[in-house]
Structure formats: structure tokens, C-alpha cells
């Protein structure tokens, strides 16, 4: 019987190094001959569908992003030894909470609780989780939202959601990628040795 894929999730606000880190990690696992699936369905995909994103996040856009992440991660289990998740389900919820705070909006508590229950139920699927730490001195990537306050709020709210549903997460700081890469490889090796 085939072993379940090892899932590594990286959460955090935009332009904090998630994608760069995961691409390097993908290369390292592939060099070992492992089948790696990189899962990333960004807010840009939601925007293409017509959903509001960033400071305009809604219950519906958040539900779509969470459902899409679960769909893609589940499909990846068919063929992957390792699944690398750029923006786990917790990110969508964190962005919604940041958007509500940023725009002084609210949604029905029952709707928010429904999203929280999904995140709580799905979070244990990740074998290893990182959350990036926002370094405001690092410039935003090209084409990124320039609302600095929203970016900070998103970082805070994503971290808050991750802390709640993935308390064993590890911090991924700017300049600390090499240690995090080594840690991720060691965690995979430990699990596959039955430790």
C-alpha cells in the first residue's frame, strides 16, 4: 500500500517569500527522485472567476479559495510523494478577516464559524507548516497590491489563524530559508523512517 504524501504548507501575506521557498524545496525533493506536486491557486485565479480579493474579500471568495485548495491538494494525493502547498486553507480565512477589519465590514457570525470549522478540520492534513514573517523592508513583487496597511493586517490575521489551527507551525523569516529547507527535508526523512 502506498504511503500518504507528505504535505508541507507555507502561509503568509503576499511578497514574503512563500513561492521562492517552495520552488527551492521542490527542486531539493525532485533531486531525490520524489514525485512533487506544487499546489497554488492564488487570489488571481479567484479574481479571474469574478470573485473580489484582497481588501475586498467576501465570504464567497473565501469559501471558493478554501474549496479550491482542498480540491487541488486532494487531487495531488493521487500521484505525489510530497505536496507543497503555497497558501493553505488558513490563508483565505486570514485574508477575509484582514479585509473585514480593513474595510470596517462584517459578515454573519454563522458564516465565519462555518469557514473556521473547515479550516480546523483540514489543518491536520498538513504534516509540516510554516508561516512567513513580514519584513516591511523587503519590496513588494511586481504587480502586487500596494496597500501597505492591508498587507500588514493580512500578515497579522493569517498568523493569528495559523496559530489557532496549526499551532505547531514554524516561522519562516526573510534570510532564514536555508535552515527552513533543511528542517523540512529532515521532517520528511523522519516521517519516512517511521520516527
Image (cartoon, rainbow, N blue to C red):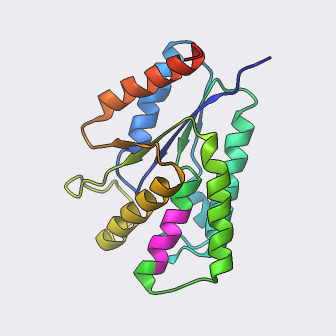
Q: Where does residue 9 sit, x and y in percent of width and height?
A: 52, 41
Q: Is residue 51 left or right of residue 180?
A: right
The residue lying toward the viewer, choosing from 102 and 37, is 102
In the image, residue 190 above or below residue 48: above
Question: Residue at position x 35%, y 66% from top?
Answer: 151
Q: Position of residue 143 (x, y in %)?
A: 39, 60
| Principal secondary structure, stretch drawn in magenta | helix
Tell me which residue sits at (29%, 69%) in the image: 148
Outermost residue, left direction? 137
The location of residue 117, given as percent across then percent down, is 67, 62
Quarter location, residue 120:
bottom right
For this rendering, which residue is in front, 44 or 67?
A: 67
Q: Is residue 58 magenta?
A: no
User: Who's the residue at 31% across and 28% down the image?
Assistant: 179
- Corner quadrant of residue 65: bottom right
Name the image quarter holding the N terminus.
Answer: top right
Relative image position of residue 164 (x, y in whole percent): 50, 57
Q: Quadrant of the C terminus?
A: top right
Judge whether residue 49 can be spotted in this image: no
**Residue situated in front as seen by the camera: 21 or 170:** 170
Tally the numbered discs.
0
Start-end of magenta stretch:
93-100
Q: Is residue 94 above or below residue 85?
A: below
Would residue 27 appear left or right of 50 to someone viewing this image? left
In the displayed structure, 179 sits above or below 107; it is above
Query: Residue at the spot x=70%, y=57% of the render?
Result: 67
Residue at the farthest right position:
1
Amino acid at each position: 500500500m502506498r504511503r500518504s504524501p507528505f504535505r508541507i504548507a507555507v502561509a503568509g501575506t503576499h511578497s514574503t517569500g512563500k513561492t521562492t521557498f517552495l520552488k527551492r524545496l521542490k527542486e531539493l525533493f525532485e533531486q531525490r527522485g520524489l514525485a512533487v506536486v506544487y499546489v497554488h491557486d492564488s487570489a488571481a485565479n479567484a479574481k479571474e472567476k469574478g470573485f473580489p480579493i484582497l481588501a475586498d474579500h467576501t465570504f464567497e471568495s473565501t469559501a471558493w479559495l478554501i474549496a479550491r485548495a482542498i480540491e487541488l491538494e486532494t487531487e495531488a494525493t493521487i500521484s505525489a510523494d510530497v505536496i507543497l502547498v503555497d497558501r493553505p486553507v488558513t490563508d483565505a480565512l486570514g485574508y477575509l478577516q484582514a479585509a473585514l477589519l480593513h474595510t470596517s465590514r462584517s459578515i454573519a457570525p454563522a458564516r465565519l464559524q462555518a469557514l473556521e470549522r473547515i479550516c480546523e478540520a483540514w489543518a491536520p492534513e498538513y504534516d509540516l507548516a510554516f508561516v512567513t514573517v513580514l519584513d516591511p523592508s523587503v519590496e513588494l513583487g511586481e504587480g502586487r497590491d500596494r496597500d501597505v496597511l492591508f498587507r500588514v493586517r493580512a500578515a497579522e490575521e493569517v498568523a493569528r489563524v495559523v496559530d489557532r489551527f496549526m499551532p505547531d507551525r514554524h516561522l519562516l523569516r526573510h534570510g532564514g530559508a536555508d535552515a527552513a529547507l533543511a528542517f523540512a527535508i529532515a521532517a520528511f526523512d523522519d516521517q519516512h523512517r517511521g520516527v
